Amino acid sequence: MIEFLKESTFAVNETIGKAWAVTKRNYFSIATLCFLMFITSNASGLMAFFLKDVNKGLSVLMAFFFVMFYFTINLSLFKYIFHLLDDEFNVSIVNTIPTRRQIIRFLVAMLYFMLCIIGVYSIVILIAFPFIYTGIRMEIITNIAISVGIIAIFITWIRISFFPFFIIDKNLPPFLSIKFSLATTKGNFTKILLLLLVLGGFHVLYLFFSYLKWPVIAFFINVLSSFIIVPLSSVALTIAYRKMMSEYKGEGEPDIIHNIV
């Protein structure tokens, strides 16, 4: 177990080291796309606030427009990073805009993604249901079921959240991208978790100092996270995907049953 953790830690350090080199070399182009995502996200919130009492239909339409724009930029960011990893330094950001088919596949895959999350939580609740008749207090059963459900959702989210990379990099259909994400993350969960813990550390610090009511320190940590950690995270996750794909030994279309555990 100790050897496995050492190997996982080394793999995470290697991924972050390579991600830092790529981010530092192409910081302004990567940060520009991240900044556009940030502006789009905040602009959608402002538009929803101002239009909520004007017209519900217009509010929904604008929300849909901003969501589509946000996802398009996000996919463009991943596609741009792929070009950088392939040493294509002369690529233009305009040329990394995903195709209409890729955007549609991403949206359909997002629907599958949400159904998977709901399905996992529903299974946990169904398993917990018979315990109602054991005499254990309902409050205890509910708390345990919710806790287990949240853990199951978190694990599922990590295992299948790499599907956008398969759509952008391999042009795979929606459900197949989910299946490949499940297959390639098999055996890599600890590495991905460690990577997310390292990348999410600044956000935890921000919440910690906000809780202590130290707004100045929390503000600077948030700024550092927004302008350094967010671009670095995008590159690191893309590199992690490429590494998992290079190590994947499966052939043909992976099935779900044999890749769950």
Image (cartoon, rainbow, N blue to C red):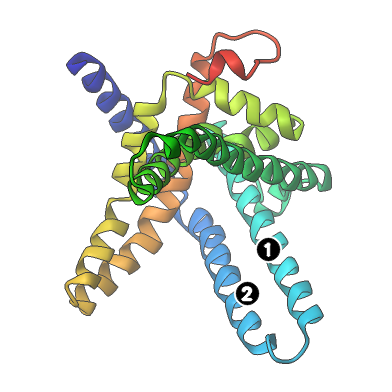
Q: Would you say 252 lies left or right of 233 here?
A: right
Residue 170 in sight: no
Residue occupied by mark 1? 67
State which quadrant residue 171 falls in: top right
Residue found 16% across the figure and 72% down from its top: 212
Residue found 58% across the figure and 65% down from its top: 36
- The reply to whether dot 1 and dot 2 touch (C-beta < 8 Å) is yes
First in residue order: circle 1 vs circle 2: 2
**Camera-side residue of 238 and 135:** 135
Residue found 61% across the figure and 53% down from its top: 74
Q: Secondary structure at mark 1?
A: helix
Residue occupied by mark 2? 44
**Camera-side residue of 140 and 89:** 140
**Camera-side residue of 12 and 157:** 157
Please name the amino acid that badge 1 sits on.
Val
Residue 191 in sight: yes
Q: Would you say 240 lies left or right of 170 here?
A: left
Q: Quadrant of the N terminus?
A: top left
Residue 92 point in image, percent of width and height: 66, 50
Residue 84 point in image, percent of width and height: 55, 39
Please name the amino acid that badge 2 sits on.
Ser
Please count the marks in the image: 2
Graded by Cα atoms within 10 Å as few (under 14), some (14 to 19) or many (20 or more), the crowding at tag 2 reads some
